[in-house]
Image (cartoon, rainbow, N blue to C red):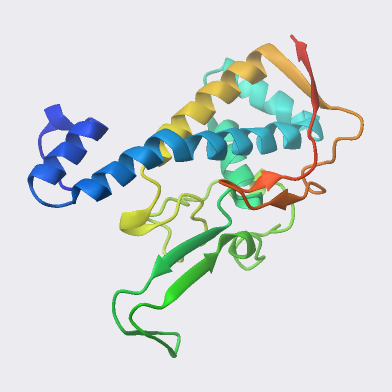
C-alpha cells in the first residue's frame, strides 16, 4: 500500500485509502484488521515469557540488561528479544502458495503449490548462527537482521515480503516497553519444577505454546 500523505499514516487510514484506490479488497482490509487485533496477543506474550525464562538462568545477562536500561540503552533488550524469537519462534513456519510456475535451486514449483518455510529449523542452523542450538545473544549481536538488509533471510520471525506480519513494529515496541518496566522493577527466578527454556516443550496453537507449566518467582526490587 502506497501512502504519500503523512497526515494519513495511521494504520486504519492507510487501509481505507488502499481500499478507495482499489489496491485491496474489503475482505483483505478486514483480514488485516483482524490480524492486528487478535494475532498479536499470544505471539508477543509468549515471546516475552521465553525471554524472562531465559533470564532466570542467566543472571549476569539480567543484570547487564538492567544496567543498560537505567542508562537508557536498549542494545541488550533488543538483542534479547531477537534471540528469543530466533530460539523459539512463536510462529515456527511460514505458509505461502505459489502464484506462478517457477524453479528454485533446480526444483520446479508449479502454480498453486503450497510452500512451507520451516523457521524453527532455519533459525537453529549453525551456518546461519554461530551457536544455533543455544540461547545466546551473540547469535544476533551486532548483526543487521532486518528483512530489507538480510540478503539470505535467515531470520524472519515476522515473515517476509508483502505478507509479513502487519503488526511487527507495534509488537516490537510493546515488548520493549513491557520488558523494560518489568526488569527495572522486579527480579525473576524459575520456580521449582519449571523447566529451563531449552527443556521447555511446545505445541502448535494460535501461536507456538509451551506444553509444560511455567512458573516464575517475582520479587519487587
Give the residue drawn at x 8%, y 43%. Answer: 20
| Left or right: 119 in relation to 66 | left
Give the residue drawn at x 77%, y 22%. Answer: 188
| Left or right: 76 in relation to 58 | left
Quadrant in which the C terminus is drawn? top right
**Residue 165 versus residue 38: which sits nearer the camera?**
38
Q: Is residue 138 above or below residue 93?
A: above
**Residue 189 x, y percent position in the rendering:** 82, 25
**Residue 123 x, y percent position in the rendering:** 60, 59
**Residue 64 x, y percent position in the rendering:** 69, 27
User: Residue most toward the top?
Assistant: 221
**Residue 80 versus residue 103: which sits nearer the camera?**
103
**Residue 140 versus residue 105: which sits nearer the camera?**
105
Whether residue 139 appears in this view of the structure is no
Whether residue 176 appears in this view of the structure is yes
**Residue 69 x, y percent position in the rendering:** 58, 20
Q: Is residue 69 above or below residue 194?
A: above
Based on the displayed image, in which of its 4 quarters is residue 65 positioned?
Answer: top right
User: Residue most toward the front?
Assistant: 27
Amino acid at each position: 500500500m502506497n501512502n504519500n500523505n503523512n497526515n494519513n499514516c495511521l494504520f486504519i487510514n492507510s487501509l481505507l485509502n488502499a481500499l478507495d484506490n482499489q489496491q485491496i479488497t474489503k475482505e483483505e482490509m478486514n483480514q488485516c484488521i483482524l490480524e492486528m487485533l487478535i494475532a498479536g496477543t499470544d505471539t508477543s506474550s509468549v515471546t516475552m515469557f521465553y525471554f524472562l525464562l531465559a533470564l532466570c538462568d542467566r543472571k549476569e545477562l539480567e543484570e547487564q540488561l538492567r544496567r543498560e536500561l537505567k542508562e537508557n540503552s536498549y542494545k541488550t533488550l533488543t538483542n534479547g528479544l531477537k534471540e528469543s524469537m530466533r530460539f523459539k519462534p512463536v510462529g515456527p513456519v511460514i505458509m505461502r502458495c505459489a502464484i506462478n510456475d517457477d524453479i528454485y535451486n533446480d526444483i520446479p514449483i508449479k502454480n498453486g503449490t503450497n510452500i512451507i518455510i520451516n523457521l524453527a529449523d532455519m533459525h537453529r542452523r549453525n551456518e546461519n548462527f554461530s551457536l544455533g542450538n543455544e540461547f545466546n545473544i551473540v547469535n544476533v549481536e551486532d548483526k543487521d537482521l532486518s528483512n530489507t538488509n538480510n540478503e539470505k533471510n535467515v531470520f524472519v520471525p515476522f515473515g517476509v515480503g508483502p505478507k509479513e506480519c502487519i503488526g511487527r513494529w507495534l509488537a516490537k515496541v510493546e515488548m520493549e516497553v513491557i520488558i523494560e518496566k518489568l526488569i527495572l522493577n522486579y527480579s525473576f527466578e524459575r520456580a521449582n519444577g519449571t523447566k529451563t527454556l531449552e527443556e521447555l516443550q511446545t505445541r502448535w496453537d494460535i501461536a507456538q505454546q509451551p506444553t509444560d507449566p511455567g512458573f516464575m518467582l517475582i520479587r519487587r526490587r
